[in-house]
Image (spheres, rainbow, N blue to C red):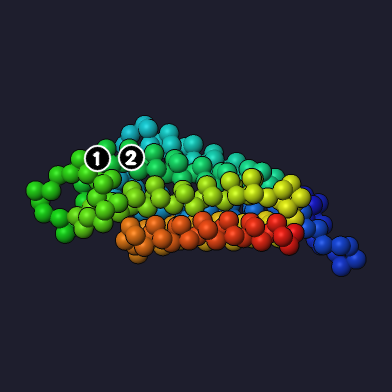
Amino acid sequence: MPWLKDGIIFEPSLSIDWKQIEQLTRLFVAAFATVLSWDGYFRSVQNKPIEDGARFSIDVFLVFLYLFLLLTSKFSFFWLWVHASAFLFYAAWDFLSIKIYREAYINTSASAEFKPTVQDIYVGSFTDDPDVYRGPAITLMWPVFFFALPISYQFFLSEVDRAKPLTTFVYACWVLFGLLAYRSDKRVRLSFSSRLRKILLSVLAVVASSMILRMIC
């Protein structure tokens, strides 16, 4: 970015450099996602410390994935795919955590005799079992929304549509919405039906916004 590399701020005599503004938008969203990932990570390792090589490897890979996301903010192709791909690694991290720390996914209201299997944890998280933490279901369901972003961006919009600054700003808002909604779901613990309805409505809204962008861009 010229403002960072050469110290050239937008001058009144020059036209607005929308490419720089788009890049700054993608960079801001990438930084926001990175900070939120730290928040989620530190909360998770409080009761599920990293003592295995598999989850440590995923953590290291995610560090480089977010670094790649930051460094490629100039390009419009990568960012939405990277945001979505990160959730696949979150899901893998969850699966490994359940195998090692199943007790961490049992709510305090459960009886001492409750000893669920890995499958029980997943089934319970989807069926609103009061004895099971709903985190695994949350991590598996929200990728539906995040993959709707690059798919609609790449296949519903033309190259001309994707080149418009408004498209970048709309999709940046959707990424921010998804990140905040995902974290909110972790804290509020929506029921399965409420979460499913929220995610499906959000996906429909993304598709609708891409259709609108096609008409006005």
Along the line of sight, the residue nearer the viewer: 68 or 174: 174
Camera sees residue 65: yes
Classify mark 1: residues with Cα within 10 Å, few (<14), some (14-19) or many (20+): some
- Which numbered marker is on residue 95? 2
Q: What residue type is labelled 1?
A: Val
Residue 211 position by quadrant: bottom right
Q: Which amino acid does label 2 sit on?
A: Phe
As helix, strand or loop, the secondary structure at mark 1 comes to helix
Look at the image and tell me in which quarter the C terminus lies. bottom right
Q: In this view, does 202 lie above or below 143?
A: below
Q: Is residue 188 above or below residue 139?
A: below
Q: Which residue is drawn at 53% across and 53% down?
A: 33
Along the line of sight, the residue nearer the viewer: 141 or 5: 141
Along the line of sight, the residue nearer the viewer: 186 or 122: 122
Q: Residue at x 33, y 48 (%)?
A: 136
Q: Which residue is drawn at 43% across and 37% down?
A: 58
Q: On the picture, is 17 further left or further right than 154?
A: right
Residue 164 position by quadrant: bottom right
Camera sees residue 4: no
**C-alpha separation, residue under disc 2 versus residue under disc 1:** 8 Å
Q: On the picture, is 104 further left or further right than 55?
A: left
Q: Position of residue 42 (x, y in %)?
A: 39, 51
Q: Which residue is drawn at 58% across and 46% down?
A: 151
Residues at circles 2 and 1 in contact by the CB criterion of under 8 Å: yes
Residue identified by numbered label 1: 118
Q: In this view, does 184 lie above or below 34?
A: below
Specify which label sits upstream in the sequence, 2 or 1. 2
Q: Position of residue 3 (x, y in %)?
A: 77, 55
Q: Position of residue 50 (x, y in %)?
A: 34, 40
